[in-house]
Structure formats: C-alpha cells, structure tokens
C-alpha cells in the first residue's frame, strides 16, 4: 500500500515537472520557428509538393487523381524529403553539470536539457527522428518521442530521487555507442572532464559518418573566475580538491587553460567535421537554439 | 597631567606573561580557507600558487590580538587613576587650618579634603580635633563624625594667622597626635616653628595648594589717575587678571563701574595699572576687586584718599586786579589745589553742580535767591565755610539777629590787636579742646592773629566755638544747619588779618573739616586721638558686610595694628572722614610658602579617582571587533560584506539634496505645469493626464511649449518652479501641514496661481453645501487669498488667447471665481472693458473637472468621454481653450488688458 502511495506521489511530482518543462521547451521551439519562418527559402520546407508522372512500379493508389484529372497524364504526389534523418542526443547529466554559481542562474544541466529538448521538438516537428545516443532511447519520430525524451531528461535532473546513476559520476563522457551511421548528433556538456573521452567518442562517430554539434554549456563563474583569498576548490562530486592561498592570482592562468580547452575542442570538431559552440547559462537559451538550428540544418 | 595609576587586583597582571606564548601559538595558524564547489577544478589541477602569502597570520593582526588581550587583562586588573591614600599615623588626628583670606578661593576643596580626611579617620575609629590658626580656640579630641558635623560652618577669616608659637604650644594637648595641616600658599615666619611643634607630637602631613596667591593693594590716586597695584606670591609666568571697579550708580544701586586688565610680566610679582576715571565716577567707587577670585585679599576698599572733594570758592568783590597774593582766595587755592576739585564762579551757577563745600571768602550779603538756594543746599548736607574780612565786618549781616548762614552773631566792627594804633600783641591760638574737630593738631607758635570779627556773647556761643585764640575769643565757630553745617573763620582767608593761612595748620584744619583730604596714607599724628567707627567690614571671601555692632577703633591702631577679630578689614568712619583698612597694605609683600625640609607636603586639589577598567575593556572589545573584520578580510570573505554594506550605504545615503536637485532640474529646465498630489491614485492620474493634454495643446497651438507635467508633493517639493498648480479637491486628501501652507502662501504671494477644481460641477452653487466645496473651504482657509468674485464678463481671462465666455470642463457650470476687481475699476468711455489693470488672480476656483476634459494618454487620445457626439467634442475644445487662456493669463498677466488702450493711444496719436 505504501508502495502504491509512494509511486503515486513520485508520479505526481514527475507529472508536475514534466508539463512545465515541456511547455517551456515547446514555447522556446515556437519562438525559433516563428523567427525562422520569414527567412525560409522557397522550396526548402517540408510542405513542398512535387508531382511527377507515374512511372512503372508506382501503385495506383499513389496516383493523385485530382491533379491527373486536369491533364491527360497521370501524376503521383510525393514529398521531396522523404527520408528523415536520425539525430542522436547526449546531454551530460554528471555532477559537474549540476553546478550553478548564483541562485538567479539555472544549473548547467537545466539549460543543457532545455536546449536539447527544444532542439528535439524542432527536429521532430521538422520530421526528423530524434533519440538518445546509446541504447536507452533509439531515434523515433512523433510527439510521443518528445514526451519520452522529456521524461528521460526530467528523470536525470532529480538528484534527490537519484533514479539515474549519471549524477554520481564526476564528469560525463560522451556516449558514442550504437550510433546510427550517417546520423546527426548533438552533444551537450560542459566538457570539463577528460578530453580524451570526447576525442574517442568523436573519432568513433566520425568513423560511422556521424556529424554533429558539440555544445559547451558553461556557468559565467567558470568563465570569469571571480574568486579571492584562500580557497579550496572542490569538484561537484567532491572527489577532486585544489587548494590555493590566493585565488585571484590564479585567474589569468585558469582562463588560459579554459581557452586552451575550448581551442582543443574546436580543433577536434574541425578535424571530424563537427561544429562547436559555447553557451553560457546567463545568456538566453534562444541564442543557443538559433545557432543550433542553423548548425543542424546544414547539409551534410 | 597624568597622576598615579593603581590596581585593584595587581596579581592579575601576572597573566601578561602568557602573551608571548600566545603570540607563538597564534602565529602558526593561518586563516581558515573557504570551501567552494567549482567544476573547473580540473583545469586548476597542476597550477601552483605564485607566492606564499597568508601562510601565517600577518604580524599586524597578531599585534592587534595581543593588544586586545593585554587590554583585557589590564582592564580586569582594575586600574584606577589617582588612587587616594590619605592615611597617616594611627593616633588622634589634629586638623590644623590656616583659614586665612588666602584660603578662601579654594575653600570648598579644603572642606572636601577635610571631609575626606575625617571620613578616613571615622573609618579607622580615630578621634579628631580642629584648630584654626586664624581664630585659635582651645580644642578637644572628639569622634571624627562629631567634628565632621561642624566643618560645614567653617569659614576663612579675612586676616592672616597671627598666633605666636608660645600661644599655640599652650593650646596643644599633652598627648601625642598626628597632624594634618591644611595650609594656604603664603609664607609666614611662624611656619617652621609650628611644623617643628607638630612634628614632635606625631606625624605631620601638609596639604598646600599648588597655585599662586593673588591680592590687590589699596588703590592710590596719582597724577590724575587711579593707580591699581596687584601682587602675587610666585614670580611666575605672564598672567593677566581683571580688576573690577565697584561702586554705586546715581540711584544708589551697586554696580560695576569699570574694569581693567592688570598683567603680571613674566617673573614679576607686582603688576601696576592705572585707570582714569571721571571725578564723579571716582566719587562713587566703593571697592576694587579682582574678578573671579573670592578672597578678602583680592578686594580693596576705597576711602577718602580717592575722593576729590569739589570745593566752590566764592570771593566778595575782587577789584584789585593782578594782586594775586592779596586775593582772598589765593591761600585757599594753594591749600586745596592738590586734593580737591575747585569750582569758581557764580554761586547760582555752581550750586546745581552740588559741590561738597562752598567757601565764601569775605562775602557779606547774598541776594535773596542765592541765600535761599544756599540754605537749601546746606540743609541737604552741604558744608558752608565762610571767612571774615573787611566787608563782612562792615556789613550788618548777623548783627541784630543770627543770620541763617552764620554760626554766630557778630559784634559791630570787630577788633584789631597788635597794630600800630592798638595796645597788646597779636594773639596766638589756644590749644584745641577735646570736642573740637581739630583736637590733636599741633599748634605752631608762629601763627598769630591781628584782626578778627568778634562774636556776640550768647548762650549758644560756647558750644559753637571749635577754635579760639589764647585770650579766649572765638577764632572758628560752627553750627549745624539741617544736615549740613556752617563754619565761620573769624579771620580773612588771606594774610591781611592773620598769619594762619601761611601755616601748615591751616591746611590741617581744612583737612579736619573734610574740606580737603589727603591723598596717600594718612600719618599717625593725623589720626591721633580720633576714634573710628567701623562702617562695613569684609569677611574672608571678600564679601562686604555691614559692621553693625563692632566696637570702634583708635586712630593709631587703625593705621598699623595687625588685623584680627578686634580690627577687621573694612571701612571706618570718623566725623566726616572715612578711611579703609584693607587686608593688603600698600607695602605688603606676598611670598610663597616654604616648608621645612622633609615635610610631607601634598597638593590640595586631589584628582578624582578614575577607574580605567571600563575603558580598557571597551578598547579590548573594539579591537576584537576589528580583528573579526581583519580576519574576514584576510580570508577573502569580506568582499560580499563590503558589497552589502556598500549597497546599503548607497541606498541609505542617497542624498536628499540630490533628489531635490533633480526635481528642481526637471521642473525648471522647461516650463512645467504641476498638479497637487491628492494621494487618490485615480484623481492624480487624471490630473496628470489632463495636464499632459493641456501641455500638448499648448505645444501645438501656442508658443508655450511645456514638457511633461509633474505631480507636486506639497510637503516635500519646492513650489516656486511652477507657474500654475492644478489642485483637484477630493474628500480624502490630507490637510497640508503648517509648513506646507507657509510654502503655498509664499507661492501665491510671489505670483503663482492655483486652479482649484472641486470637480462637482458646482451643483450646490459655489461655497455652499457640496462636500467638495466644504473640503475646499477647509483646505483653503489658511491660505492668503484675496476677496473673490464670480468671473466678470470683461475679465482678462476671457480674452488672453481665445475669446471665451464659458469655461467648460467635463461639466459646463458657468461660475468661475477669481480675485475681485478693485472697487474703483471703471469703464473708460468708448472702451469695451473696464480698466482692470493689475495683477494675475492668484487663485481660480471652479468645479468643472477640467482635468478630465483635458486628459490625454501618451498617444494623444482623449481619455474620457465628454458630452455626446459633436457637441461633446466642441465642449472639449472649449475646455482646451480655457486651459490655453488660463496658462496665457498666468504667463502674460495683464498684457491683454493693456491692449484695450491701443485704440485710445492710436486716437491720441492722431492716427
């Protein structure tokens, strides 16, 4: 009985999160669609129709009788963009992504999953198949997939309920298993962990012909390093420590290293044909999305 | 000066030893780090700190803590500044006091000291006795509390101790005792002996003040000025004291007549200053005093030596011009000149100057008016001295009956002795009798009289003679008349009849008659045989008291005997003469007290015991607070706090001036219409929108280009910037404060205009019973508003820009009230309007809710519906026109009214 009750409570809590999160993602997606609408070139949309003469092999059911009736020939109505692409998402849910430097800012993970979910809404609306990299949620199309993705992301946020094991790890490594060949990929993370893991994942993806986007989500504090005095820095998972006596002295060298890390990632992307961008949690998600939309739209 | 410091718990100071140990311990502990979660730590790994600061606590922080701790320890040890330690010996305590005039200035601290000493004695259960050296009495040792109850009544004497050692020895008891001697600062010969005497009996401690005694010597009259001389006991630094001259004003009230600064030069013990005072003022001086010093020594009484009597000299006919030595007044002048002010002239002219003495030299008859005035003057206390002469001898004055102004009747002719035609020799003077004012004066043998007028024998004659010749004939007679007296010298005032005017006796006689008075110290021979009655005496504090029942003093004692209970310093009187005996004689020297070597001398002014523990503990606490801040700063946690404090300061301290300034700038850089804030949001918004609409209309149609209207808070904002204030009346608005009313009145007086809007269409007709009307009445009651009248048809408001006859707003009531036109306003022949040529109405009152009609939102759309259809729009247009006219009226005043003269002017110019 208590189990049922607990389950019910959890479900209610989940349900209360989900619509909100979803709604925000939908809303965001709506703004991007609206913003992109006027700029669309003729012939590029998915509501483009083409009529062609019936060829051999076409079934009769495929004939568009209304069109055919206006002429002597028989036409088939067909959509140009028939084969949808698969987009694989990976959102880093590790401990380091749970960081936020100020109460007014969202956690890095919150921003990351918002971007990822909104992107998937846009993609699914655009007819793409979206799924998670790895084996958890293979790419599918349709609204139901949005719900499934949302559910997945929501689960991973709740560090309290601890349903997923991702948050236990200090820094996430990109999931590059079970990549569909020639698919697209979107990796959202802070990429603060071991760069070798990213390198390996990208190499694997490149092998399979997968192109994609690395989106680095950083907190403003990680960019500005606003610390002073004697400080012990701990990683979010408490496994790494670093003690300094004068934190302000470190600033320049830290920023150097950060720039170095970004450069490394950018280089990695250019080698593998991926694209790289950095997003800060104090900026609006929309800027990231616009960039992402264009990046993913880019022909292979 | 810093006195000694004692500790209540000195053993606590031992813990100070622990401080160095603590130093070493504290040194090794660095400030605690802050723990921060930071994902970017991976990037930090491998970085090294460039410099190893903050490893140890910085020395200044350590020092801060050490001082805080030291202050804590010392504070707890109970430090006391100037701890008292008055205990001496164990036996009975004899308290010896000089109690002289020199003790008077700090008498209260002496009493306080006595109180404390006796307190201590009472605690130690010792007996005590009190001995005043200035007024010694046989003493007995009593319980200290018993003695203590008497000390309140002690007072310093106005003289110095003059007891000698033998007398003192007899007063002292046999048994041993400890002595506390509360002394003054002056040296006396007896000090050493007394100290030895006391030391034999037991321990001796002397309390002597650490200051110089200051005193004022008697003032002297020298060379036309009053000479003041101050003395002090120590030849110290330059010091200036103020001497006040006390006296009576013409009505007799005590008053300070003048004051002068006397400056002691560095190292000088005497300071001299002369004051020049007019004779009238000088005559009223009672005493001199050093201001701020309560001591008999600082007061010196003035007596006759300072007075210069005014003597009127009037001679009979002076027809022998140029014969100075034969002039009847010559010898009188010579005798009186040094010591008296001489007045010469017409008797009638002189008497109003109220001279002290009038001398008539050989004046026989007086005019009746002169006689009457002179009699009146004598009866009021004047002294009339007459000298005989040939004219008097030849006249019939006082022949048959005694003349009022003659002391005796005269025989006809007089007599001449020792001349060529007479027998006998010139007569010498007989010794003066005891009741004569001249008693005591030596008679010189060379004075002889050859001629005189003779007194008629008379029963009263014997009593009236005060000097006679050797043959018993009267030489000087005197009678009293009213309060004054009349004296007749039976000889001439020149040497015609006698050699008296040539002798020194003449001067002394005049002096005894108080005609003249000596400047300078009177000599003993001068005072021999006289008895002086004390008039006023001084106490030790220099207060001047009535002498009441004190006994008289012999003249020679008055001059030189030491002061004491029998001869107190004060003002003495004998016959008409007054003499002062002061504490300080002209030659008294003040010297600093010198104590025998080895005497325990303590300062008199004991400093207050001040516990310092509290101060040190507070200091410690303050330092620890500082330490908190410093520690936070060291570990880098202060930034947030500083930012917080900074923010608070920024918000809290935004200067009101700046707000005022920005308001003034906004209101005055452009023309701005203002509305009074009523605290009713809807009304205020309407008013603002209305004024915005009006401003917009003005901008579009006229050269007035106002910027956005401003809501005016009557209590806080300056009104002077606004040409027009729109004041919608609401039931609920608060009555402005008195201050705000003052501002409003100032605004109205300086040319501002307020448009009151009751917004009720004036349904009840103005001022009657509508609620808003009543509210307006209460609001406007304290305002300085002139008489009002309903707007006349020819008011300038009807034509300042548009020609208007109605002033609708949202309502269309007709009545609008403005300042009443002057009564004498008349219509000039041929003019359409009266000549209302003055001023702008300070108020316009109506009820048409104009703001609603004017109201415009930011896009320029009307906010409220006015009327219906086109008629409504017309009404709104008229409302705007009224607004335009109103603002024009405010800004241009009676300009349009002046325009009515244009036709007449043109006509006169012949156009």
Image (tube, coloured by chain):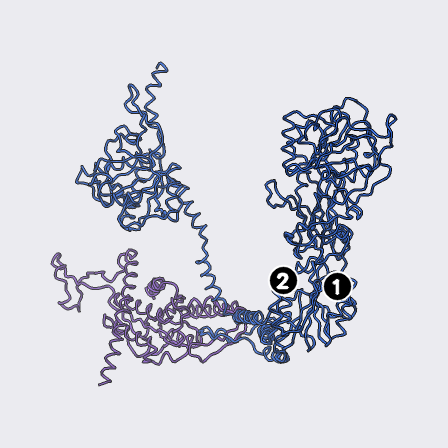
Q: For this rendering, which residue is in front, A296 or B163?
A: B163
Asked whether residue B52 is in view, the answer is no
Q: Could one spot residue B615 in this view of the protein?
A: yes
Query: Label 2 marks which chain's residue?
Result: B
Comparing B250 with B22, the one in front is: B250
Percent position (x, y) of residue B562? 75, 56
Circle 2 SS class: helix
Q: Residue furthest top?
A: B910
Q: Are marks 1 and 2 in contact (CB under 8 Å)?
A: no
Q: Which residue is mark 2?
A: B108
Of all chains in the rendering, the one displayed in purple is: A
Using the numbered discs, state the Cα–Cα distance from disc 1 to disc 2 in whole angstroms: 24 Å
Q: Quadrant of residue B409?
A: top right
Pointer 1 residue: B163
Q: Numbered disc 1: what chain?
A: B
Q: Which chain is blue?
A: B
| Observer-nearest of B897 and B384 | B384
- Between disc 1 and disc 2, whose residue precedes? 2
B181 horizontally vs B73: left or right: right
Q: Residues within 10 Å of mark 1 (few under 14, many from 20)?
A: few
Can you tell which quarter of the image residue B568 is in? Answer: bottom right
């Amino acid at each position: 009985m208590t189990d049922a009750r607990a389950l019910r409570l959890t479900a209610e809590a989940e349900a209360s999160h989900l619509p909100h999160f979803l709604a925000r993602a939908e809303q965001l997606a709506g703004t991007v669609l609206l913003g992109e609408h006027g700029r669309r070139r003729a012939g590029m949309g998915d509501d483009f129709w083409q009529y062609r003469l019936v060829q051999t092999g076409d079934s009769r059911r495929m004939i568009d009788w209304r069109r055919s009736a206006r002429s002597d020939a028989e036409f088939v109505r067909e959509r140009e963009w028939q084969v949808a692409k698969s987009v694989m998402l990976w959102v880093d849910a590790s401990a380091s992504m749970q960081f936020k430097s100020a109460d007014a800012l969202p956690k890095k993970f919150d921003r990351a999953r918002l971007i990822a979910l909104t992107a998937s809404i846009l993609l699914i609306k655009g007819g793409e198949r979206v799924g998670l990299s790895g084996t958890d949620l293979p790419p599918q199309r349709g609204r139901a997939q949005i719900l499934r993705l949302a559910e997945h992301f929501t689960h991973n946020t709740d560090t309290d309920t601890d349903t997923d094991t991702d948050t236990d790890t200090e820094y996430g490594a990109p999931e590059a298993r079970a990549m569909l060949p020639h698919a697209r990929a979107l990796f959202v993370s802070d990429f603060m962990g071991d760069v070798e893991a990213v390198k390996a994942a990208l190499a694997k993806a490149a092998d399979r012909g997968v192109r994609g986007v690395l989106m680095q989500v950083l907190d403003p504090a990680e960019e500005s390093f606003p610390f002073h005095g004697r400080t012990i820095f701990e990683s979010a998972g408490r496994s790494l420590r670093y003690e300094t006596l004068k934190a302000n002295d470190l600033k320049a060298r830290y920023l150097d290293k950060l720039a170095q890390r970004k450069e490394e990632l950018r280089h990695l992307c250019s080698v593998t044909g991926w694209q790289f961008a950095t997003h800060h949690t104090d900026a609006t998600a929309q800027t990231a999305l616009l960039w992402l939309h264009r990046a993913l739209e880019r022909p292979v | 000066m810093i006195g000694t410091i004692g500790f209540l718990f000195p053993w606590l100071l031992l813990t100070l030893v622990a401080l160095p140990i603590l130093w070493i311990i504290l040194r090794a502990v660095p400030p605690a780090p802050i723990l921060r979660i930071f994902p970017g730590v991976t990037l930090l790994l491998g970085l090294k700190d460039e410099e190893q600061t903050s490893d140890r606590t910085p020395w200044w922080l350590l020092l801060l803590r050490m001082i805080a701790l030291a202050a804590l320890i010392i504070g707890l040890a109970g430090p006391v500044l100037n701890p008292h330690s008055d205990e001496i010996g164990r036996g009975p305590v004899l308290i010896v006091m000089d109690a002289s005039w020199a003790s008077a200035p700090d008498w209260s601290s002496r009493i306080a000291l006595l109180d404390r000493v006796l307190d201590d004695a009472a605690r130690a259960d010792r007996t005590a006795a009190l001995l005043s050296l200035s007024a010694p009495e046989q003493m007995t040792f009593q319980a200290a509390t018993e003695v203590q109850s008497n000390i309140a009544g002690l007072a310093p004497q106005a003289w110095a101790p003059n007891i000698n050692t033998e007398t003192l020895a007899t007063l002292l008891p046999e048994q041993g005792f400890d002595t506390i001697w509360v002394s003054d600062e002056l040296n006396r010969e007896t000090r050493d002996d007394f100290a030895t005497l006391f030391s034999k009996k037991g321990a001796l401690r002397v309390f002597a003040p650490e200051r110089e005694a200051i005193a004022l010597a008697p003032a002297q009259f020298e060379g036309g000025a009053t000479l003041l001389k101050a003395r002090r006991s120590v030849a110290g630094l330059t010091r200036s004291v103020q001497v006040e001259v006390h006296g009576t004003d013409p009505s007799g009230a005590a008053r300070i007549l003048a004051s002068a600064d006397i400056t002691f030069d560095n190292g000088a013990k005497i300071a001299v200053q002369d004051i020049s005072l007019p004779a009238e003022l000088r005559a009223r001086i009672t005493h001199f005093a050093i201001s701020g010093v309560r001591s008999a020594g600082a007061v010196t009484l003035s007596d006759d030596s300072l007075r210069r009597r005014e003597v009127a000299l009037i001679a009979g006919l002076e027809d022998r011009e140029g014969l100075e030595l034969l002039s009847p007044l010559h010898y009188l002048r010579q005798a009186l000149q040094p010591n008296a002010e001489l007045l010469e002239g017409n008797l009638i002219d002189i008497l109003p100057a109220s001279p002290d003495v009038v001398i008539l030299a050989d004046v026989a008859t007086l005019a009746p008016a002169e006689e009457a005035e002179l009699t009146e003057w004598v009866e009021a206390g004047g002294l009339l001295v007459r000298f005989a002469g040939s004219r008097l001898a030849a006249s019939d004055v006082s022949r048959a009956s005694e003349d009022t102004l003659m002391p005796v009747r005269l025989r006809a002719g007089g007599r001449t002795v020792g001349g060529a035609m007479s027998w006998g020799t010139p007569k010498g003077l007989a010794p003066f009798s005891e009741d004569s004012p001249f008693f005591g004066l030596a008679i010189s043998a060379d004075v002889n009289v050859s001629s005189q007028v003779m007194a008629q024998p008379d029963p009263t004659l014997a009593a009236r003679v005060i000097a006679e010749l050797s043959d018993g004939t009267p030489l000087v007679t005197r009678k009293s008349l009213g309060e004054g007296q009349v004296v007749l010298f039976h000889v001439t005032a020149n040497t015609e009849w006698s050699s008296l005017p040539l002798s020194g006796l003449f001067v002394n006689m005049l002096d005894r008659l108080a005609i003249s008075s000596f400047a300078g110290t009177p000599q003993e021979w001068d005072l021999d045989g006289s008895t002086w009655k004390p008039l006023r005496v001084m106490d030790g504090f220099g207060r001047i008291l009535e002498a009441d029942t004190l006994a008289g003093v012999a003249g020679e004692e008055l001059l030189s005997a030491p002061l004491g209970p029998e001869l107190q310093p004060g003002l003495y009187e004998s016959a008409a003469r007054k003499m002062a005996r002061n504490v300080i004689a002209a030659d008294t020297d003040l010297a600093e007290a010198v104590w025998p070597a080895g005497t325990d001398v303590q300062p008199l002014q004991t400093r207050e015991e001040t516990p310092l523990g509290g101060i040190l503990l507070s200091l410690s606490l303050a330092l620890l607070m500082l330490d908190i801040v410093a520690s936070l700063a060291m570990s880098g946690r202060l930034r947030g706090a500083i930012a917080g404090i900074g923010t608070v300061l920024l918000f809290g301290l935004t200067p009101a001036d700046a707000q005022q300034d920005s308001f003034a700038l906004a209101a005055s850089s452009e023309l701005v219409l203002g509305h009074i804030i009523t605290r009713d949001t809807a009304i205020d918004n309407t008013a603002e929108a209305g004024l915005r609409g009006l401003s917009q209309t003005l901008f579009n149609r006229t050269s007035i280009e106002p910027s956005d209207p401003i809501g005016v808070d009557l209590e806080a904002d300056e009104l002077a910037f606004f040409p027009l204030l729109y004041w919608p009346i609401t039931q609920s608005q608060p009555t402005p404060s008195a201050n705000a009313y003052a501002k409003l009145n100032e605004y109205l007086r300086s040319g501002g205009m307020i448009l009151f809007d009751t917004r009720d269409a004036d349904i009840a007709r103005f001022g009657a019973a509508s609620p808003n009307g009543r509210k307006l009445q209460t609001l406007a009651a304290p305002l300085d508003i002139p008489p009002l009248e309903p707007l006349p048809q020819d008011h300038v408001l009807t034509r300042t820009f548009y020609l208007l006859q109605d002033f609708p707003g949202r309502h269309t009531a007709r009545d609008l009230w403005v300042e009443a036109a002057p009564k004498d306003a008349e219509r000039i022949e041929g003019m359409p309007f009266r000549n209302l040529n003055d001023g702008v109405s300070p108020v316009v009152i109506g009820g048409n809710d104009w703001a609603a009609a004017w109201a415009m939102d930011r896009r320029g759309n009307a906010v409220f519906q006015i009327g219906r259809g086109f008629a409504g729009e017309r009404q709104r247009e008229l409302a705007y026109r009224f607004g335009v006219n109103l603002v024009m009226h405010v800004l241009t005043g009676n300009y349009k009214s002046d325009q009515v003269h244009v036709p007449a002017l043109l006509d006169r110019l012949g156009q």
